[in-house]
Amino acid sequence: MIFIYTGVLFPPCCCYPERSGQDHTGRHLKIFHRQPAHPELKTGRIMKMLKTAVTLCALALGCAASSFATTYPLTIENCGQKMTFTHAPERAVALGQNTAEIMLLLGLKDKLAATAFWPTKVMPELEKQNAQVKLLTVEIPTLESILAVNPDFVAAQLPLLLGPDSKVAKREDFSSLGINSYLSPGMCATRKNTGDIYGSRDALWNMDLLYKEIADMAAIFNVQDRGEKLIADYKTGRRPCAKSLQDVPAIPPSYSGSPARRRLLTPTWGVKTAPPALSPAYSAAITPLPPPQNGRR
């Protein structure tokens, strides 16, 4: 006896004998044909399977997203001060090109109420975004102009813009108004004893300080996935340059020069002069300079 099944296997179904007979050799044949189950039963089971699949996908995506999500309230320690955020800032003010560019690179254009203090042109890839953000001034802003945009967060690149000796405001001025503030981590160890506004430092500046600032901003604004990607891009992009500069002699701590020229200094050199808060554009693609002659350039 030979059984022959016609149709596609897809549950639920019922198989019914269609006909039987003999082939040319005399063997008995019994042919079964697939008959679908009741349409409502079939549809119901399919929908159940689809719902299960969708639920599993949602759970998987949720777990992936939760690994990057900020849990509020979030407490961050910055330059010896603790700040607590109950939610992501909606109207931030960035004081300094470095700080503003980091926020723009993190895709926070819509979270920026205003920026100020731009010593150089914005990174070309950020021109369109930056043009849509209010500019208070390319120079040092006033406290009144900052408060006029009703900020809920103020981040600064230099103590000149935010700190005990700032011409703009002290951090206490903002905290008294319930506004969190942030100072570039590279400036936390800066001492103002060089006779200029940029100060000096005891420890060498290194790229980890920039990475920390990016990570802090990403956590504050709940965009950690963007922060991790940006840090990874910088680490990948600067390896060839760092390798080419590994044999360059260290620059003595007394080295001086314009802030724009200092931005070209790589962390692999022994730089102890500020400003340590480098623009991301220069930190990521540092331009090699010729070796110093007699300790000078």
Image (tube, helix red, strand yellow):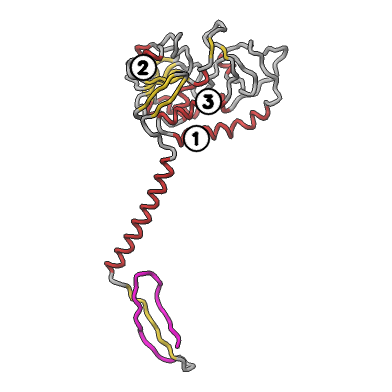
In this rendering, which labeled residue sits more in front, label 3 or label 2?
Answer: 2
Farthest residue, direction right: 294
Which class describes the residues within 10 Å of circle 3: few (<14), some (14-19), or many (20+)? Answer: many
The tag on residue 228 is 1
Q: In the figure, 169 relative to 61: above or below?
A: above
Q: Secondary structure at mark 1?
A: helix
Q: Secondary structure at mark 3?
A: helix
User: Where is residue 107 drawn, in percent x and y?
Assistant: 43, 31
Examine the residues drawn in magenta and state their main secondary structure: strand
Placement of the C terminus among the 4 image quadrants: top right
Q: CA distance from mark 2 to mark 1?
A: 29 Å
Q: Is residue 98 in sight in this rendering?
A: yes
Which class describes the residues within 10 Å of circle 2: few (<14), some (14-19), or many (20+)? Answer: few
Q: Amino acid at mark 1?
A: Glu
Residue 152 placement, left or right of 276: left
The tag on residue 210 is 3
